[in-house]
Image (cartoon, helix red, strand yellow):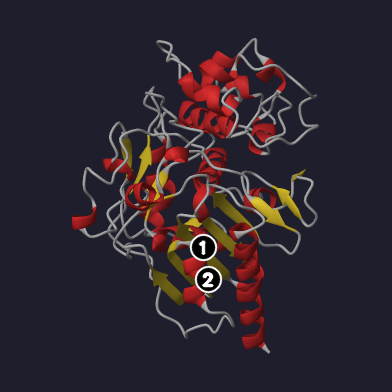
Amino acid sequence: MRRLWAAALLCAATAGCGAPASTQTADNLPKDLNVLFWSQDQRDAAFRTMETVPKVVVHTIKAGGVVHPLPAGKPLDVGVDVDAYMAKQRNAGLIIVQDGKIRLEKYALGYGAAGRWTSFSVAKSFTSTLVGAAVKDGYIKSLDDKVTVYIPGLKGSAYDDVSVRQLLTMTSGVKWNEDYTDPKSDVAQFNLQKPVAGEDITVSYMKTLPREAPAGSKWVYKTGETNLIGVLVSSATGKTLSDYLSEKVWKPFGMEQDAVWMLGPTGHEISGCCMSASLRDYARFGEFILGGGVAGGQKMLPDDWLPAATTKQAGIDIPGRGYGYQWWTNDDGSFAAQGIFGQGIFIDPARKLVIASNGNWPTATDPEGVGAAREAFYKAVQAAVDREAK
């Protein structure tokens, strides 16, 4: 059976235990990992319990004992019918945190605050943050180091010329096709790769790719390269991504619940995808970023990390938008982590604003439909905060 362990569970460029036990039956959970072909009902069930789907193996991201508070604030009048918006988005959860307080929190689709929901490509921004932590800790000496310094298995490939920074910004110049509808695309073939003994499956495939442009000269969205970033972090630190994320963020910042991270066929976290965490903990990650990467009273990231990571480092041919270090950036200073089927963390430092959403859109991507409506909702929330400030 075809195993779309990374890219179909991937994350398009556009980012369980929440449901009552009675809804989580063997009948409505999918029997394979080809998420793009699951029914809507199967996705509703599986997205909140990914670790129970047959063939899924996970590592746990352990939380600590002290929880970062998210006190209730004054309800925010967004100026739109939030229930109708959530219904059209098929949101399972939506939370607005502003100035450290919860201004709105709603759930649907049988999901609730006690549950987890899958991240899809929202995980990319977590993975990039671990690069920053590894730089701060001295495991990665420089973003200008070649990728092969940390992943020797890529030596002799097109990645000989690629720096860590270029991997982070998806400007490697290595040829890649992320067309989810094309069975011959890299994102499809990548998932058919057979493991090679002693080598991470990501490395096995990526080292076969040809170069199409000089390194640093062309931006192309590549889930496979985020998976390489995860391999790089684990190789540099000698730790699993789950353990390192627990050490640098989950425990010291005070996440409320354990999270889980899905593993690929060779036992490594699928770093371009597939974390599962609670809605409030996704919002807490936004608060961690807003606070400059401080957790437990310590700076977990270099001083210059977030200013670079969350601003445009590469153009994406969309006016007013760009790409940072695995973050989607806006020229107004806001930025976001985004994943297929409606996952997202939107962060606006100027307004001390975090909006986190979990969902199950009718289709994986729909930039002109629900995607555009989500962007409009973000702007409505920004306008609501501005009205209050007057």
Q: Nearer the viewer, residue 48 or 169?
A: 48
- Kind of residue at badge 2: Tyr
Describe the element under mark 1 as helix, strand or loop.
helix
Residue 100 visible in rendering: no
Percent position (x, y) of residue 57?
Answer: 31, 33
Residue that numbered label 1 is attached to: 89
For the question of whether residue 32 can be seen, the reply is yes
Q: Amino acid at mark 1?
A: Gln
Q: Quadrant of residue 260?
A: top left
Image quarter (top left, top right, bottom left or bottom right) of the N terminus: top left
| Above or below: residue 127 compared with residue 232 | below
* Quadrant holding the C terminus: bottom right
Across and down, in percent, residue 330 comes to: 72, 58
Which residue occupies the foreground of this view, 269 or 149?
269
The percent position of residue 326, horizontal first and vertical second, equals 61, 44
Mark 1 vs 2: CB contact within 8 A? yes
- The residue singled out by tag 2 in the image is 85
Q: Is residue 163 left or right of residue 256?
A: right
Is 354 left, or right, of 1 in this rendering?
right
Q: Spot the residue most to the bottom.
A: 390
**How packed is label 1: few (under 14 Cα within 10 Å), some, or many (20 or more)?**
many
**Figure check: 6 above or below 48:** above
Q: Which element is circle 2 on?
A: helix
C-alpha gap between disc 1 and disc 2:
6 Å
The residue carrying pointer 2 sits among few (fewer than 14), some (14 to 19) or many (20 or more) residues within 10 Å by Cα, namely some
Residue 172 picture quarter: top right
Near-viewer residue (166 or 374):
374
